[in-house]
């Protein structure tokens, strides 16, 4: 969502006549987009702002900070310390034009209505793009700062979403990822709005080859949504469904509103219609008062579901969240040791699942050169990360490939068919069309 928000602000700046630059040394204004969901990104922001403040002093650089951290008192203290000129909360991104008028200090923490109706142009040079369909969250997980920073849920109108998507299709985009804090709660905040299942069917008819979405909350993952994913051909058979813990006691303290049994029933329903679904999750270890028995419940849930992959985290206490008042009582070594055990199972299942693809044909969206330049990197329709030889697939685009080799993180294949290569030439792809968030 931050990537989408950065693009949204970039597009307003470009419309105002600004030029994006890829090197901070050429920028007159630098805007840092921030995350507040864990402690580590906050530390990174401080380090980045520390470096930028030196440039501000040496050559009068104008400094901005946007995103979730900007909305919090903690972030505002940081902004003061590092002499930030422009501060925009995540609901105030349409204030960027006003912020730059008159070269004065400008701070806005408003939740503006026009942000939901703002339609940015498709990002240049990208085959796979994001589209925010709702902002904010009506759930209240006790560890999470998002309802504080992003406010209650507001869904964008289907008309707006389809207009933004139409421009993407016209620009040659091949994959869209629908975004929201709880994307599957779409429409629940406004009576008479279509639900997420209905929206998926509408988006499916847009002509875009691939539709993905993230992130979902198990409570609102209805039978209709599962049905819509199963029956809509271009909706990728990939679901990221965060469970966070396998222990009912911990889930209750986390305020997740469902039980282990409810979650497993949703998974069974999903697999009854889509046996080959690519399923990933988020898991937190070391939540306050998590016992070894609680953690074993998480491990056993992982084995029962056999996720294709997972994002695993050590609990990070965030000031301002309800769980912050509970003593963060798990020693660091215990948390680390639990995380290691969980990652071992994650790697095991990722290897098993990826290996099951060997010999099979998959559809691949190649996005561009991989880190290792003899390969191009992309994702299968079901979201497996894949590398194909650049000699066989020199251009970004859609291909069919046979999987030959698998590791826990990646599958490797050989091209069997070129379906559609992109209008984006490799030269353009390699140019810094989406630079870092530096602007002149
Ligand atoms: S559902 Fe929970 S974890 Fe997700 S954004 Fe809302 S409060 Fe945070």
Image (cartoon, helix red, strand yellow):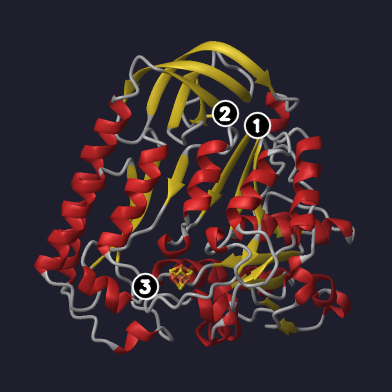
Question: From the viewer's perspective, is 276 left or right of 366?
Answer: left
Picture layout, residue 70 above or below residue 286 = below
Q: Secondary structure at mark 3?
A: loop
| Residue closest to the eye, 268 or 334 | 268
What x and y, as percent, mark residue 199? 65, 51
Note whether residue 243 is visible.
yes
Q: Are marks 2 and 1 in contact (CB under 8 Å)?
A: yes
Residue that label 2 marks: 365
Which is nearer the N-term, disc 2 or disc 3?
3
Picture layout, residue 247 above or below residue 84 = above
The image's mark for residue 159 is none
| Residue closest to the eye, 204 or 298 | 204
Question: From the viewer's perspective, is 41 left or right of 249?
Answer: right
Residue that label 3 marks: 257
Residue that label 1 marks: 209
Quadrant hosting residue 274: top left
Q: Are marks 2 and 3 in contact (CB under 8 Å)?
A: no
Which is nearer the N-term, disc 2 or disc 1?
1
Residue located at (69% from left, 64% from top): 193
What x and y, as percent, mark residue 330? 17, 75
What x and y, as percent, mark residue 329? 18, 80
Residue located at (38% from left, 26% from top): 411
Quadrant in which the N terminus appears: bottom right
Q: Say whether mark 3 is within 8 Å of ligand 1.
A: no
Residue located at (75% from left, 62% from top): 157
Q: Are marks 3 and 1 in contact (CB under 8 Å)?
A: no
């Amino acid at each position: 969502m931050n990537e989408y928000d950065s693009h949204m602000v970039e597009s307003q700046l470009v419309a105002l006549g600004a030029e994006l630059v890829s090197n901070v040394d050429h920028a007159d204004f630098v805007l840092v987009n921030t995350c507040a969901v864990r402690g580590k990104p906050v530390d990174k922001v401080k380090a980045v702002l520390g470096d930028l403040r030196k440039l501000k002093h040496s050559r009068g650089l104008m400094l901005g900070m946007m995103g979730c951290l900007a909305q919090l008192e903690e972030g505002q203290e940081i902004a003061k310390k590092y002499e930030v000129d422009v501060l925009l909360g995540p609901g105030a991104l349409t204030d960027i034009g006003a912020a730059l008028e008159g070269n004065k200090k400008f701070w806005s923490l408003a939740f503006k209505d026009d942000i939901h109706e703002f339609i940015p142009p498709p990002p240049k040079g990208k085959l796979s793009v994001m589209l925010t369909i709702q902002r904010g969250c009506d759930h209240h997980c006790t560890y999470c700062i998002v309802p504080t920073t992003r406010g209650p849920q507001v869904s964008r109108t289907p008309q707006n979403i389809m207009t933004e998507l139409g421009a993407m299709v016209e620009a040659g985009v091949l994959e869209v990822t629908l975004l929201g804090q709880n994307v599957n709660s779409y429409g629940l905040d406004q009576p008479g709005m279509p639900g997420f299942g209905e929206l998926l069917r509408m988006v499916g008819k847009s002509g875009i080859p691939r539709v993905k979405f993230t992130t979902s909350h198990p409570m609102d993952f209805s039978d209709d949504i599962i049905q819509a994913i199963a029956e809509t051909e271009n909706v990728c058979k990939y679901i990221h469904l965060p469970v966070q813990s396998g222990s009912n006691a911990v889930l209750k303290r986390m305020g997740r509103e469902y039980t282990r049994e409810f979650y497993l029933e949703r998974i069974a329903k999903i697999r009854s219609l889509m046996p080959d679904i690519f399923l990933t999750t988020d898991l937190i270890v070391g939540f306050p008062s998590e016992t070894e028995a609680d953690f074993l419940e998480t491990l056993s849930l992982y084995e029962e579901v056999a996720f294709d992959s997972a994002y695993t985290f050590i609990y990070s206490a965030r000031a301002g969240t309800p769980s912050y008042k509970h003593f963060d009582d798990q020693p660091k070594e215990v948390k680390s040791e639990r995380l290691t055990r969980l990652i071992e199972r994650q790697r095991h299942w990722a290897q098993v699942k990826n290996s099951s693809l060997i010999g099979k044909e998959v559809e691949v969206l190649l996005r561009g050169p991989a880190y290792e330049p003899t390969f191009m990197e992309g994702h299968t329709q079901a979201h497996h990360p894949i590398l194909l030889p650049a000699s066989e697939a020199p251009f970004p685009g859609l291909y069919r490939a046979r999987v030959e080799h698998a590791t826990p993180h990646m599958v490797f294949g050989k091209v069997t068919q070129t379906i559609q290569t992109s209008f984006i030439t490799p030269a353009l792809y390699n140019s810094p069309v989406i630079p870092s968030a530096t602007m002149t």
